Amino acid sequence: MKLPLFKKKPAPPVLKAQGLGMHWDAEDPFLFASHHSDDYPAGNAQQAPPLRQISGRNLGRDYQKLFGFRMYHGKVVPGFPLHSHWGYETVTVPEKGFVDHFDSLGNCGRFGFGDVQWVSAGSLYSHDEMYPLAFDDRPNPNDITQIMIDLPSSSKGSAPAVSTVWAEDVPVVELEGCEVKVVAGSFGGASAAAPHPGSWAADPAHGVRILRIAMRPGASLDVDGAAPGARRNLYFVSGADASIGGEAYGSGQRLKMDGSAFRVENGGAESAMWLLEGVPIGERRAAFGPVALGTDREVLDAMNEIRRRELADWPWGLVDRTQPKGAERFLARADGSTERPVRRSS
């Protein structure tokens, strides 16, 4: 779907407003973001939808929301079978639902329901990301946001790295009628765990901040100013309406903001927003498909290497593997170690 052009002259601190689809435009240091929201039914023995609900689809590339959900590139289980990344980071945050992943390094796991996965693909990194319908006694709705952050040239070519921040360890600031999840950076006295060392977000001077804001009807939230020189965008994902700078906005909009402090006054429905901001890397970038490097020649060479190596280097056999039914959240590393969330006592 073609998104509308920017609206003209909204009130400060909003500089421009633009329609929002499944894929979100972004500004340096971010590349883009995607938001997947699907009402999956109860799963069968394969953790998949019933055959009658997926027959007749364009399986392998199903972005049409039939029966309330899409299969994406999955042919049995929804999701994204084997594919590569090169030259950037991926931050994946499933608010609802699980993500099963296997990668070319030999790592695998399952995360979901508020966990945060960071993948830093300075060099060729391949994985599958499937959305298992893990529950067979109830529906399996998902809400998954994935944010792509560019890497500086000094980190392009570095070894890939994968980490999971379990929901129990993700800082959440609770204010009156509001809940702010701090995925990167700081807010309200809470700071997120530092990402991989080569990440643009690892240096506080770069002012990278990723916040998920949930607001109840009638609530208001004050957001402090961005770092000097940072670019800031607010993505109004769901809700009815909200007021910023005295002007009302509806959900389904990207709002390009200036760097000043602002207040959001929510309307009559629960709403969810994402704030992405950071000082731009400001380097030359060439990108195509799953590759973001410095020059067109580098991108072409990388694409050719992906074609040669993607399947040859894949250690898992199936390109759309999922974890066994009933699996809990975990990260199993290639060195034999396993990480699991530590449940906090209330």
Image (cartoon, rainbow, N blue to C red):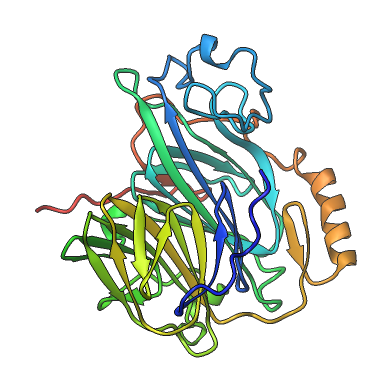
Instruction: Give above or below for 341 relative to 27.
Output: above
The answer to whether one can see residue 10 in this image is: yes
Q: Residue at x 61, y 49 (%)?
A: 105
| Quarter placement of the N terminus | top right
Front residue of this view, candidates 53 and 110? 53
Front residue of this view, candidates 17 and 280? 17
Q: Residue at x 18, y 60 (%)?
A: 177
For this view, does 219 lie left or right of residue 29?
A: left
Q: What is the x, y in percent for residue 305?
A: 83, 52
Q: What is the x, y in percent for residue 191?
A: 32, 74
For this view, does 175 lie left or right of residue 163?
A: left
The answer to whether one can see residue 166 in this image is: no
Front residue of this view, candidates 19 and 207? 19
Q: What is the x, y in percent for residue 315?
A: 65, 38
For this view, does 250 lie left or right of residue 23?
A: left
Q: Residue furthest top?
A: 52
Q: How many marks?
A: 0
Instruction: Give above or below for 305 relative to 29.
Output: above
Q: Residue at x 55, y 53 (%)?
A: 20
Q: Residue at x 28, y 57 (%)?
A: 267
Front residue of this view, candidates 298 and 96? 96
Q: Quadrant of residue 142?
A: top left
Q: What is the x, y in percent for residue 323?
A: 46, 31
Q: Residue furthest bottom?
A: 228
